[in-house]
Amino acid sequence: MGEKFYEITTDGTSRDRPNADWRVTISQEYKWLRISIGLDDVFNVVIPQNIDFISPGRRFFVGMNIDFGKIK
């Protein structure tokens, strides 16, 4: 759950608009190598009114981890 922010409406009241940032990651490990792919911000939440929430929306990523302690 992201930080809460308040939107001021035309009648002067404020309204809470919470957001949730979902991430899906799949990884495969083989001996000393782990490869991951995923999707960040699954629901493509972009809130231009909130300057503290600077997410550009949905992002794909690929990662690779090497465990040098397991290399023989």
Image (tube, rainbow, N blue to C red):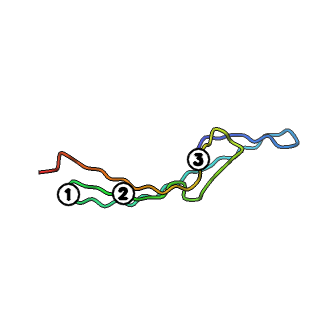
Tell me the SS state at disc 1.
loop
Q: Residue at x 40, y 59 (%)?
A: 37
Separation of residues labelled 1 and 3 (CA atoms):
35 Å
- Please name the amino acid that badge 1 sits on: Lys
Residue denoted by label 1: 31
SS category of the residue bearing label 2? strand
Mark 1: give few (<14), some (14-19) or many (20+) Cα within 10 Å.
few
User: Answer yes or no: do the residues labelled 1 and 3 have beta carbons within 8 Å?
Assistant: no
Q: Which residue position is annotated with label 3?
A: 55
- According to the image, label 2 marks what residue? 36
Secondary structure at numbered mark 3: loop
- Chain-order first, disc 1 or disc 3: 1
Q: Label 3 vs label 2: CA separation? A: 21 Å
Q: Nearer the viewer, residue 61 or 25?
A: 61
Quarter holding residue 34: bottom left
Residue at (59% x, 50% y) in the render: 56
Residue at the right extreme of this rendering: 11
Evaluate if marks 3 and 2 touch, with contact meaning CB atoms under 8 Å apart: no
Which residue is at the front of the view, 5 or 65? 65
What mark, if any, has residue 59 been given in the picture?
none
The mark nearer the N terminus, 1 or 2, is 1
